[in-house]
Amino acid sequence: MGSRVSREIGHDEYDPWGTLSLIVIYFVALTLMWLFTYFVEFIGNTPTVMGMIVPVMLG
């Protein structure tokens, strides 16, 4: 069948562009989710979670 050729690369030869791109994609997704939550929860009305907790604590 043939022999497999493998080559070890050193620390200086490793170029992690794939890992960096995944981190950037996840950060962008997290930022977009945070912005969506911010605009849904806090723009134009009171925060819904705090609006539900405070009457329960005081009542």
Image (tube, rainbow, N blue to C red):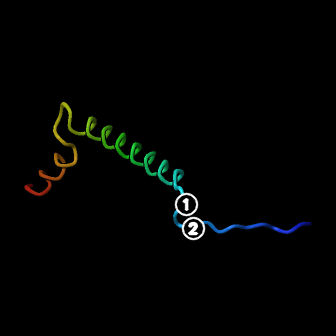
Q: Is residue 14 above or below residue 46?
A: below
Residue at image point 20% right, 33% down: 43
Asked if labels 2 and 1 touch by Cβ distance under 8 angstroms, the answer is: yes
Using residue 30 as the reference point, say whether residue 11 is left or right of it.
right
Q: Determine the residue located farthest toward the top in the rendered image.
A: 44
View extreme (left): residue:
58
Residue 55 is situated, as x and y percent measured from the top left of the image, at: 12, 51
- What whole-number distance in Å separates the C-alpha atoms at marks 1 and 2? 7 Å
Residue 25 vs residue 4, the one in the foreground = 4
Which residue is identified by label 2?
A: 10
Q: Residue furthest front?
A: 12
**Residue flagged by tag 2: what amino acid is it?**
Gly
Q: Which residue is painted at 17% across and 49% down in the image? A: 50
Residue 4 image position (x, y, % from top left): 81, 67
Residue 40 occupies quadrant: top left
Q: Nearer the viewer, residue 4 or 29?
A: 4
Mark 1, secondary structure of its residue: loop
- SS state under label 2: loop
Q: Residue at x 36, y 39 (%)?
A: 32
Say which residue appears at 89% left-offset and 66% top-offset.
2
Viewer-closest of 48 and 35: 35
* Residue 46 percent coordinates (x, y): 16, 38
Q: Which mark is residue 58?
A: none
Look at label 1 and name its amino acid: Tyr
Q: Is residue 13 left or right of residue 28?
A: right
| Quarter of the rendering containing residue 45 | top left
> Circle 1 sits on which residue?
14
Look at the picture and state if 45 lies above or below 13: above
> Around disc 2, counting alpha carbons within 10 Å, would you say few (fewer than 14), some (14 to 19), or many (20 or more)?
few
Quadrant where the C terminus sits is: bottom left
